[in-house]
């Protein structure tokens, strides 16, 4: 799935977690930021496609594979490998928590742990939702994602959606983010309402996204069914036009051309 939807999905998780606690708006924004960063973080493994990868990381660590070769392989640092695993989600979430706790010393450790937990949950949750979204895409040369890394068994690669052009899911996620971010600014007297409402908004948005993903009516797993990728992408656009209607689809397609990343 595209990096923009991934990032907003992490932001949606961050907004949900932030709405569940009684804290200053500054802390809530920090939690929101943690989820947002986590939503994009797993795709740090695409750095192997960077033109300078071989001359930097490749040379520093004496890597045998070029970056472009590694990208589509099943090395630990390949795309959809270690960085797309549950292990990585928990590891980086705990690492973030440790950094926050250390930055707050010498406050009591028990207080630090409780105040840091929402950041860890937001980051880990935002990270995991990225991986779940990728499971619905074509498996590519990997056959899915290494969710249970260090196990070499890749899961997902369902081909229920195309890599991008999933404008309907993007709009659902964006709506969830806008609604739940707005709830963060409600006063303390109605915090209980914000907690319940944000949870309901997130659950409904998640359910709608899953429904849309599961009902494309086309198999995008081009590596398995040998369908040309160009045919898959065109079919994805046709499905989006049917779902959104011409006016909304044309706007989203225009927006797509204005954003300098695959969307």
Image (cartoon, rainbow, N blue to C red):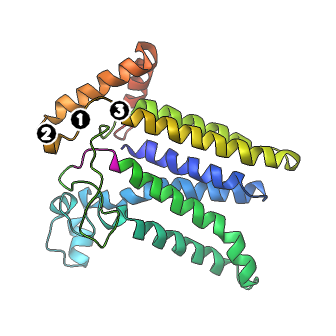
Quarter that holds the C terminus:
top left
Percent x, y for residue 122?
58, 59
Taking 7 as reference, is 78 above or below it? Answer: below
Per the image, the residue denoted by label 2 is: 225
Q: Secondary structure at mark 1?
A: loop
The alpha-carbon separation of the residues under discs 3 and 1 comes to: 15 Å
* Crowding at mark 2 (Cα within 10 Å: few <14, some 14-19, many 20+): few
Indicate yes or no whether the magenta region holds residue 210: no
Within 10 Å of disc 1 (Cα), the crowding (few <14, some 14-19, many 20+) is some
Of discs 3 and 1, which sits in the foreground?
A: 1
- Which one is earlier in the sequence, the residue at label 2 or at label 3? 3
Q: Earlier in the sequence, mark 3 or mark 1?
A: 3
Q: Which mark is residue 165?
A: 3
Horizontal relation, residue 129 to residue 204: left or right: left
- Quarter of the figure with residue 178: top right
The image shows residue 180, relative to residue 62, as above or below, that is: above
Of the numbered discs in the image, which one, if any, rests on residue 169? none
Number of residues whose C-alpha sits closer than 10 Å to that of mark 3, classed few (under 14), some (14–19) or many (20 or more): many
Question: Where the N terminus falls, by quadrant?
Answer: top left
- Label 1, label 2: how far apart the Cα atoms are: 8 Å
The outermost residue toward the right is 189
The image shows residue 54, relative to residue 38, as above or below, that is below
Q: Are marks 2 and 3 in contact (CB under 8 Å)?
A: no
Q: Residue furthest left?
A: 226
Q: Residue at x 22, y 59 (%)?
A: 71
Disc 1 target residue: 219
Q: Inspect the magenta stretch and tell me whether residue 137 lies in it.
A: yes
Q: Select label 2 or label 3 by which is in front.
A: 2
Image location (x, y in percent) of residue 61? 24, 78
The region drawn magenta spans: 135-139
Q: Which residue is found at the position 50% from the left and 32% from the top?
A: 171
Residue 185 shows in the view: no
């Amino acid at each position: 799935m595209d990096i923009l939807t991934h990032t907003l999905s992490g932001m949606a998780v961050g907004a949900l977690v932030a709405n569940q606690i009684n804290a200053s708006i500054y802390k809530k924004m920090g939690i929101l930021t943690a989820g947002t960063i986590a939503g994009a973080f797993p795709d740090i493994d695409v750095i192997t496609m960077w033109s300078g990868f071989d001359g930097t990381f490749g040379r520093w660590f004496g890597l045998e594979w070029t970056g472009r070769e590694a990208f589509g392989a099943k090395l630990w640092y390949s795309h959809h490998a270690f960085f797309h695993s549950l292990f990585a989600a928990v590891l980086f979430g705990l690492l973030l928590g440790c950094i926050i706790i250390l930055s707050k010393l010498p406050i009591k450790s028990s207080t630090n742990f409780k105040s840091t937990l929402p950041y860890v949950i937001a980051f880990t949750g935002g990270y995991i939702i990225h991986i779940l979204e990728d499971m619905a895409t074509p498996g590519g040369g990997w056959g899915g994602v290494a969710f249970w890394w260090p196990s070499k068994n890749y899961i997902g690669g369902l081909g229920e959606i195309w890599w991008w052009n999933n404008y309907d899911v993007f709009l659902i996620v964006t709506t969830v983010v806008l609604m739940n971010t707005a709830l963060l600014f409600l006063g303390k007297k109605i915090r209980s309402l914000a907690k319940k409402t944000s949870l309901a908004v997130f659950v409904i948005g998640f359910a709608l996204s899953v429904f849309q993903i599961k009902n494309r009516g086309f198999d995008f797993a081009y590596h398995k069914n040998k369908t040309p990728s160009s045919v898959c992408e065109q079919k994805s656009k046709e499905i989006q036009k049917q779902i959104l209607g011409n006016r909304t689809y044309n706007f989203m397609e225009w927006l797509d051309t204005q954003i300098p990343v695959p969307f």
